[in-house]
Amino acid sequence: MRIGFDAKRLFNNFTGLGNHSRTTIDILTAEFPEHEYWLYTPKVRLNGVTIPYVGKKHCRLVKPTGMVRGSAWRTYGLVADMKRDGIEVFHGLSNEMPVGLFHSGIASVVTIHDVAFRTFPDMYHWHDRKIYDMKWQYACNHADRIVCISECTKRDVLEFYNVPERKVEVVYQPVNPIYYEPVMEKDEMPPFMLYVGSINSRKNLLGVVKAMELMPKDLRMKLVVAGGGGSYKRRVKEYIAEKGMEEWFVWPDMVDTAGLRRLYTNAQLFIYPSFYEGFGLPVVEAQLCGCPVVTSNVSSLPEAGGPWAQLADPNSAEDICEKMVKLLTDSDLRQKTIEGGRKYAAETFDPKRLARQLMGVYERVRN
């Protein structure tokens, strides 16, 4: 089968959507090397992350060659190039579909990651919300199949975009293969807790800070915050300063995947009480590294964490604190959480399983 992908994010985005695109291509080419994977992108930012995909085995990189370039080519010129290339199935990896694909004879799939601009509108400008909504609606209307990265996202798509449920399938987001390697040895270092992710109001780092305020002094340890942010990050830091808690927080610069894996492996606890996630990838990464998890009891987080994560009300600093203390003081529960969480994550988000599910979607839409 010749499968085309919208690879803009793969070659130009180095966080969530880009990581998803790269890992999706990785698991498909590993499990199904007999197929051809055509990566369509208006441009390529070359660095250590993207260079392996320029000449990746079983893949072909395609950039615009005519007068139409950039986002205009991605939206309006892509279909003609895919017809020229004999593409049988197209997969829009990041919520969008090119115009005109519906009548091209090429089967189509789109992955919808989340609808955060609908559930957390205050985080987005009005103009951006309207554009996103229009793109998501167009993609949902015209794709032959919609892939959602969690049951939570599927519920949101059905609620907001009025599509028949038969069009929507859940294939969980794949995890970087590095997390499936044998568990690393722990380093000798002072105990610490960990937060990983963008620092914005939806992710609820302030809730973690307030929970730490409530912790018994003899249990409190430093929190490493691995993630970037703007105004909300400044607000959190101001709160920390007001409470005189600066000594309990570490703000590392950019951390690469290998560095994150080392942090997960050595942390005493991973804390992620987000209000809303399309999937909650850091929760899975932490569990695969043997790090016990406290996360939210809402959105997709119970799916990501499974039965072994401690689920807390993200609106309650008291509940978050209680779950943190439980995992830090109950050694039997802690060990069961580590072992059970790793087993759940490895089985539920097994890359071979996810690749087979995704290939099954392609085969169904092509037939």
Image: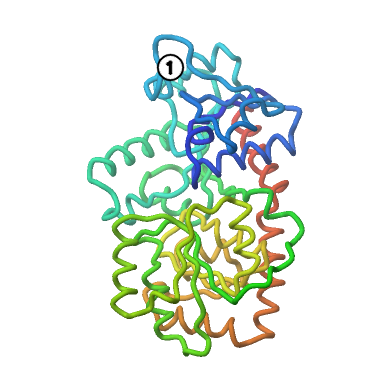
Q: Residue at x 55, y 75 (%)?
A: 310
Q: On the image, which quarter does residue 341 sit in? A: bottom right
Q: Residue at x 36, y 48 (%)?
A: 160
Q: Note whether 159 is above or below 266 in the view shown.
A: above
Residue position marked by numbered label 1 in the rendering = 77
Q: Residue at x 71, y 48 (%)?
A: 353
Q: Note whether 367 is above or below 149 in the view shown.
A: above
Question: Where is the N terminus found, in terms of image quarters?
Answer: top right
Q: Note whether 131 is above or below 308 in the view shown.
A: above
**Drawn side of residue 192 relative to residue 227, left or right:** right
Q: On the image, which quarter does residue 29 sit in? A: top right
Q: On the image, which quarter does residue 140 sit in? A: top left
Residue 58: horizontal and vertical position, in percent?
Answer: 71, 26
Within-10-Å neighbours for mark 1: few <14, some 14–19, many 20+: many
Residue 22: horizontal and vertical position, in percent?
Answer: 59, 39
* Residue that sits furthest to the left in the current view: 126
In this view, the residue in front, 362 or 179, is 179
In this view, the residue in front, 82 or 328, is 328
Give SS at disc 1: helix
Report the amino acid beneath label 1.
Answer: Gly
